[in-house]
């Protein structure tokens, strides 16, 4: 044990000089609640001095700064340089660079659908053997993460391509504890209570919800999350999977019912800030601002765990704003379903260093290093939850780990033309007055044409 | 006799008014962008830019410490000032978030649970409660916030890491990508305009045809080609790409201009024994200066503003980012929510093109007219 420690320290001393100047390390090795053993073990196993790992992904700005810091530990452990570059238009860039033969070593996909597309064209390299078993054993709800990372290759054979790193929980309702407290509202435990609370707020002259679907070219996606949540809360997980795979048609009465469940909130002028007509026009980045207005423009906002980035400057999660689990119907007995999304690493251009990097992502320390910087959730069961920067993140992590059902964002799994096209525009049509049947039928027709 | 040329129309004022109206109409978006560039994201989402020069009445919340409560007879009382340190003027106030402006400054507001609150104009408050106060109560008040503009956005952009490199990279891309196509196109245009050879008409038709090919079609094959001949993603590659994408328009524009030059000059030069090269360098090129300049402006603006070609043909590391990529991928934040940055970035990035445009604009007009009117 001691010898191992010395070896690790020696390796560190050797490569400390190689660490990038801009990736300065915020956490000293060996200090804090981190799982440094996994780091030392990893550092001992690999010596990749002089090699480089090129990574591209969707994280830019602040998130890029955090990534650079977390990945700088890979450099200090192995001596290989990590060049991470983020792009605002990652989805297009990665396709262009992979097709033209200038792909980076690793790519971080925000949507499994895109990774599956590229895998089927032979543009991805399967992960090292045994990764699937490892994920099954080490991730919470491991099998579902394996399934989400497994795609057919160009010959139609299933291979494991994607390793999930960073997860978003979507089933959250954000609220202002102060506003709730002053008005005497309790946090609803069931969907029935949530609906009662919604009515109560209206009765007392308030507006319960802020909903905004605007997002430039992607306008409509927040509504797809709503519909997915409603699917999980009204139908069985098997039905949800069948819907994603289009084995259950988009215009099935079950799907239409879920769309109408969403409509019950979004198409009621009394329920949403600005009235139903404002829903499609309000930018999703601006819509949570209503929670903080004095007097409040709304009391609740359903959005994924990333939304605090768009709260007004200086907002403290846990004090000024908090969240509760978007509850399920008590009467339907579907447990506590959780909807989520996540980013996955896939190999676009294999090299020794890239393979080593995949191994690095399996160590708890790789996850903890970003957890401690905030804005990061993981399904890795081996991490120390104490390293989460904020209690709120820890609570979100617990929602994730305690979910009876975890399902991935359906629109990210559907073919791009549906999940990033017809479904979005269909939801905009629906919130602006089209009927759920017509919208669902239209989406199904589009799906039929691409099959 | 009203319609005699040279007499002043009595409707001049109508013309002037409509010109002013149109100019203002055209300027509104730009002015809005300019104003927004001095405000931060929260301000932009709180109020429109047209309200920004005025003081706005805004509601605020202040927490008052329950620990400072003292017993006064049968009441628990907290006294203090809601403005921490700073000065301010309370207009209205209240004790509940749902009704933050229930009373005017100086009045006493009755709150729930028999509590009462008095707030003076200068922020002094008295909070009375018949029962013990366990949690910090909140006081809500409205006050006029003066207009607030700052140069923070500009500072963020100008002094962010690697911005100097990005600026130099942009120049490195733009200047050769403007000069190379002009050089090639001028020769080609002369040949297509004044040299007789078989298939000239067909060549011109092809060039015109290439004008309508969208460059997006060529991105992947072109990059594949660059990779296979070893250029890869590099500055050389992007110069060639910009040259290729700019050439059809350049050749078309310059040929049409050159064809309109007086035949007599060129023929008399040839009679005097000038070669084609001499005619080109000594006569045609100097005469075509307006057309060359106007194309240079076009090409410069387009390569300066370009994001797509730069992302595809340059490596994706921070050292080879041009300004547009730097702004889009680094400064705008992970989900592009920083409108203020976007607005000020727009003004910073148009500074250089503006200089280029104003120094060369007289050629732009002449060049554009020259090709069309004969």
Image (tube, coloured by chain):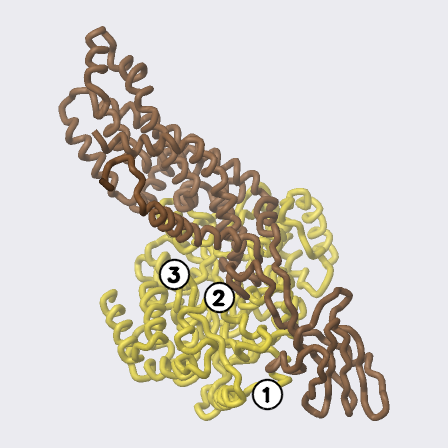
| Tag 3 and tag 2 share a subunit | yes
Q: In this rendering, would A306 be left or right of A349?
A: right
Residue placed at 70% from the left, 74% from the top? B62
Q: Which of marks 3 and 2 is nearer the N terminus?
A: 3
Residue placed at 53% from the left, 84% from the top? A206
| Tag 1 and tag 3 share a subunit | yes
Give me the C-alpha separation between circle 1 and circle 3.
37 Å
Residue A247 seen by the camera:
no
Q: In this rendering, would A342 be left or right of B265?
A: right
Q: Name the residue under label 3.
A: A217
CB atoms of marks 1 and 3 within 8 Å: no
Residue B219 seen by the camera:
yes
Colour-to-chain, brown = B
Is B272 located above or below residue A163 in the figure?
A: above
**In front here: B292 or B27?**
B27
Is A335 located above or below residue A30 in the figure?
A: below
Q: Which of marks 3 and 2 is in front?
A: 3
Q: What element carries label 1?
A: loop
Q: Which of marks 1 and 3 is nearer the N terminus?
A: 1
Residue placed at 25% from the left, 9% from the top? B274
The image shows residue A142 at horizontal and vertical percentages of 50, 72
Give me the C-alpha separation between circle 1 and circle 2.
31 Å
**In front here: B124 or B310?**
B124
Colour-to-chain, yellow = A
**Outermost residue, front direction?**
B1
User: Which corner quadrant holds the N terminus of chain B?
Assistant: top left
Q: Name the residue under label 1.
A: A186
Mark 2 surroundings within 10 Å by alpha-carbon count, few (fewer than 14), some (14 through 19), many (20 or more): many
Q: Mark 2 points at which residue?
A: A342
* Chain ID of residue with mark 3: A
The image shows residue A4 at horizontal and vertical percentages of 70, 55
């Amino acid at each position: 044990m001691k010898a191992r420690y010395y070896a690790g320290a020696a390796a560190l001393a050797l490569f400390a000089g190689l660490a990038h100047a801009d990736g300065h390390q915020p956490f000293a090795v060996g200090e804090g609640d981190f799982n440094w053993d996994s780091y030392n073990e990893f550092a001992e196993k690999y010596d990749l001095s002089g090699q480089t790992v090129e990574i591209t992904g969707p994280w830019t700005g602040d998130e890029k700064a955090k990534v650079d810091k977390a990945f700088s530990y890979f450099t200090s452990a192995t001596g290989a340089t990590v060049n991470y570059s983020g792009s605002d238009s990652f989805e297009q860039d990665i396709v262009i660079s992979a097709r033209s033969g200038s792909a980076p070593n690793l790519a971080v996909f925000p949507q499994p659908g895109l990774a599956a597309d590229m895998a089927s064209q032979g543009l991805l390299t399967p992960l090292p053997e045994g990764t699937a078993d490892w994920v099954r054993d080490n991730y919470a709800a491991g099998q579902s993460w394996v399934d989400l990372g497994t795609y057919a290759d160009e010959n139609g054979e299933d291979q494991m391509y994607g390793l999930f790193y960073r997860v978003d929980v979507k089933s959250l309702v954000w609220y202002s504890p102060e506003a709730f407290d002053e008005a005497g509202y309790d946090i609803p435990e069931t969907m029935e209570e949530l609906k009662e609370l919604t009515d109560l707020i209206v009765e007392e002259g308030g507006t319960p919800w802020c909903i905004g679907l605007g997002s430039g070219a992607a306008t409509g996606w927040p509504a797809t999350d709503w519909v997915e949540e409603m699917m999980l809360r009204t139908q069985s997980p098997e039905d949800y999977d069948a819907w994603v795979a289009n084995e259950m048609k988009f215009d099935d009465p079950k799907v239409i019912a879920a769309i109408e469940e969403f409509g019950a909130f979004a198409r009621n002028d009394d329920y949403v800030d600005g009235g139903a007509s404002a829903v499609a026009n309000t930018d999703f980045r601006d819509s949570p601002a209503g929670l903080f207005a004095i007097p409040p423009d709304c009391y609740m906002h359903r959005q994924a765990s990333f939304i605090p980035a768009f709260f007004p400057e200086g907002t403290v999660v846990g004090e000024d704003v908090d969240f509760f689990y978007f509850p399920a119907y008590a009467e339907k007995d579907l447990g506590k379903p959780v909807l989520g999304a996540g980013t996955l690493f896939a190999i676009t251009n294999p090299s020794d260093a890239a393979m080593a990097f995949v191994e690095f992502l399996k160590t708890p320390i790789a996850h903890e290093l970003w957890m401690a910087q905030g804005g990061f959730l993981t399904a890795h069961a081996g991490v120390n939850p104490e390293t989460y920067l904020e209690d709120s993140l820890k609570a979100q992590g617990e929602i994730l780990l305690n979910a009876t059902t975890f399902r991935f964002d359906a629109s990210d799994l559907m073919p791009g033309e549906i999940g990033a096209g017809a479904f979005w525009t269909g939801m905009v049509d629906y919130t602006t007055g089209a009927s759920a049947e017509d919208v669902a039928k239209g989406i199904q027709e589009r799906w039929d044409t691409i099959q | 006799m009203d319609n005699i040329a040279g007499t002043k129309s009595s409707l001049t004022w109508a013309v002037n008014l409509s010109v002013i109206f149109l100019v203002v109409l055209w300027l509104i978006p730009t002015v809005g962008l300019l104003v927004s560039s001095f405000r931060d994201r929260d301000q932009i989402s709180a109020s429109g830019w047209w309200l920004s020069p005025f003081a706005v009445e805004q509601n605020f919340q202040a927490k008052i410490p329950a620990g400072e409560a003292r017993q006064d007879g049968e009441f628990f009382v907290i006294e203090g000032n809601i403005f921490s340190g700073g000065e301010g003027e309370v207009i209205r106030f209240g004790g509940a978030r749902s009704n933050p402006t229930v009373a005017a400054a100086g009045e006493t507001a009755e709150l729930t649970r028999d509590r009462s609150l008095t707030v003076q104009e200068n922020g002094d408050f008295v909070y009375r409660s018949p029962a013990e106060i366990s949690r910090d109560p909140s006081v809500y008040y409205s006050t006029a916030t003066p207009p607030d503009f700052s140069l923070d956005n500009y500072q963020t952009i100008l002094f962010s890491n690697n911005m100097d490199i990005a600026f130099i990279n942009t120049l490195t891309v733009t200047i050769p990508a403007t000069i190379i196509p002009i050089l090639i196109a001028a020769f080609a245009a002369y040949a297509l305009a004044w040299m007789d050879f078989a298939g000239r008409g067909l060549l011109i038709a092809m060039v015109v045809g290439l004008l309508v090919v969208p460059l997006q079609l060529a991105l992947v094959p072109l990059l594949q080609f660059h990779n296979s001949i070893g250029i890869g993603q590099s500055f050389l590659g992007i110069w060639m790409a910009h040259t290729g994408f700019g050439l059809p328009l350049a050749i078309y524009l310059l040929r049409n201009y050159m064809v309109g030059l007086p035949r007599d000059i060129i023929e008399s030069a040839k009679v005097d024994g000038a070669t084609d090269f001499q005619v080109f360098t000594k006569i045609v090129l100097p005469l075509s200066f307006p057309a060359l300049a106007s194309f240079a402006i076009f090409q410069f603006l387009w390569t300066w503003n370009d994001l797509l070609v730069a992302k595809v043909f340059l490596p994706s590391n921070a050292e080879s980012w041009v300004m547009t990529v730097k702004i889009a991928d680094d400064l705008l934040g992970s989900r592009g929510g920083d409108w203020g940055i976007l607005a000020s970035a727009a003004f910073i990035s148009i500074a250089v093109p503006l200089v280029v445009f104003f120094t060369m604009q007289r050629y732009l007009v002449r060049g554009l007219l020259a090709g069309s009117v004969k």
